[in-house]
Image: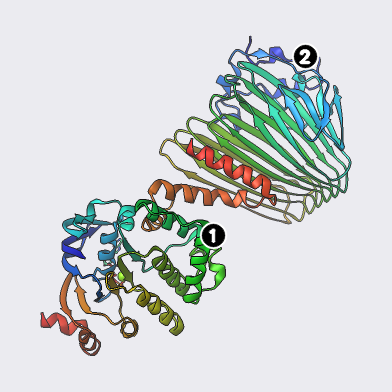
Amino acid sequence: MQPITLEIANEEHPLYERVKALGIPANKTEHYRHFAIKPLLSKEYDITIPTVGTPIQGTKLIIENGVVKEYPNGVTLSFIDDFQADSTHYDALYFMSHVLCQNVINIQTKNDITFEIEHHFSDKNRFIPYRIAIQIEANTQVEVFESFHTKGSQESLLLYGVDVYIASESRLNWIRNQNRYLDEAAIVGSHHYHAAEQSSLDLHTFDLGSGNALHIYKIDLDSYASTNASHLLLATQEAHSGNVVYINHNQPHSKSIQESRTILKDGATGIFDGKILINHDAKYSKAKQNSKAILLSKNAHMYTKPQLEIYTDELEASHGSSIGELDEEVLFYICSRGIELEEAKKMLVLAFASILIDTLDNAKYEEIIRMDFELAIKD
Amino acid sequence: MMQIKNIHAKIGDNDILKGVNLTLEAGKVHVIMGPNGAGKSTLTKAIVGHYDVKVTEGEVIYKGKDILKMPPEERALEGIFLSFQNPVEVAGVNNAYFLRTALNAKEKYHNQKETNAAEFLKLMKVHVEQLGMNTDMIARGLNDGFSGGEKKRNEILQMEILQPDVIILDEIDSGLDIDALKAVSEGINRMKDGKKTFLVITHYRRILDYIHPDYIHVLQDGKIVKTGGPELVDILESQGYHALQKDT
Ligand SMILES: Nc1ncnc2c1ncn2[C@@H]1O[C@H](COP(=O)(O)OP(=O)(O)OP(=O)(O)O)[C@@H](O)[C@H]1O
Ligand SMILES: [Mg+2]
């Protein structure tokens, strides 16, 4: 049993120096500041480095405690021990997970495909690091629905991440649905998505419940690439939960739209740290970012940090953020028709969230997420 | 049916209602007229329990109970309905879903069988057509982007579906075009069953020609200063509220 420090990393690994340079995150590390990372990393864990198993072909990518059990038909699966990670990532745990993970689970798609990724994690006091890489073939459409099944994993930490490369003119629609409770493993996901020329990434994330989780994204956009990112966060009880999303416009005519909606109950802490960087070469790019949060309790805290960093003149960019409570006048109107206050609040919260749930363009996943949302809000 | 007794009320630190007494009779149409700022909307808000209005004295007796002690939703469930002067917009809450939730809440409260989605849609369609509303209003957000007149029709739709017993209409006629005024008035007339009571606030006689009031009350400076029959409207229209003030 030991805590997560540099000592557990292999010094020989080519990315070790990156971890060292950035430093293991502490309470003062900018994008971990409100997540309470320190107590999480300093717990004593049973550290398990996943091995390569004997996966069977099926319909989903199923990962149990870091080991691939099943992978979808229509993709090529391999394990890579010298994966070329993104050396310009800003997150230390991105590198740390690469250093710790000896075999990156690598998926190569060929044609249009829809598949689910299920993370299963059931042990107590365990730390498991693993990474998934996905290469999307040019000119294809891929849809991924990612979910977490972590019952029984209290006091554990799951450190994982995806490295996704979307080849030119492809479209990836990624839905991450995370609905968890306080007594389940904390999750830190540190990701990199690279959208090549004229490709697009739809990234829709749903973080619901009382569990602790932080997802850190770096999204790189080449010319004419676009991303449409939405983040719905519903944090309850004492949860610390959020998203850190840096979108880099690297080349001309790239486009990003980002919308974050957060609902905080009880003593929950929500984080939305979104930085859009428009590089010198990214002329004629468009970026739009918006964050809205509703606090349902006086003890809830929202930390929003929307940032635009611009190094070119020819562009369109806007951002905005708001934090508020439910509109009293609207609540009164609903109650004046005989609906109880609690029900009225639920209605408004659902309406606020629906805008991000109803636009997934997939009735099945919309239904799953709506049900998870309604369960989580009752918690 | 409802006795409003000596109501004094404040908004913030301002005394707005200064002893309103009014008895609403079953099966009758009561009209309140009065100058802008007299406290008409404040009175309606006091009856339904709006948080802005602080009642400092008096009571409102309905079914033998002082309703001022009830939360707003209970007053509604007991049969009191206010059509707001300015209904709010609620984006993202589907109009039909909202109204069915309200109807089911009322049915549950009265131990009645709850109207299911299919039955409700049928019911709503009938009323929407009767009111000459666009059918796409069913699927839109509650009052979301509705025009002034559309909002008023939607209030009447709610009234017809919820079938309240005490119906308070605050300037339901303002901003309505000729057809809408007729449709809304017909909606009100359909509700008359000899038992329900109506409290209609208006500045104009147009609607009164349709709904045939029994009593006209004049509210001025936080008090009912005069009560009469429909003929009072003529006097007010020719002489204004000013004359009345001298009169009392
Ligand atoms: N929220 C509020 N804050 C402060 N003052 C208010 C508020 N609401 C109403 N008032 C004041 O209370 C008084 C009575 O307002 P009320 O809306 O009841 O008038 P009304 O008789 O309905 O007038 P109108 O015919 O213009 O609708 C007015 O002087 C108004 O300015
Ligand atoms: Mg008024």
Of the residues tagged 1 and 2, which is closer to the observer?
Answer: 1
Q: Residue at x 52, y 48 (%)?
A: A350
Q: Is residue A70 above or below residue A373?
A: above
Residue in the foreground of this view, choosing between A160 and A370: A370
Q: Locate residue A370 relative to residue B74 in the image: left or right.
A: right
Q: Is residue A124 above or below residue A145?
A: above
Residue A278 lies, in percent from the top left, at 72, 47
Q: Quarter containing ligand 2?
A: bottom left
Which amino acid type is marked by label 1? Ala
Which amino acid type is marked by label 2? Glu
Residue B66 visible in the picture = yes
Q: Is residue B91 above or below residue B215?
A: above
In this view, the residue farthest toward the bottom is B238
Q: How many marks?
A: 2
Residue in the foreground of this view, choosing between A208 and A216: A208
The quarter of the picture where the N terminus of chain A appears is top right
Q: Which residue is mark 1?
A: B118
Residue A378 lies, in percent from the top left, at 48, 38
**Would you identify the image quadrant in which residue A46 lies?**
top right
Q: Residue at x 23, y 51 (%)?
A: B69
Residue A161 lies, in percent from the top left, at 72, 30
Q: Which residue is mark 2?
A: A11
Q: Alpha-carbon neighbours of circle 2 within 10 Å: few (<14), some, or many (≥20)?
A: few
Residue B12 visible in the picture = no
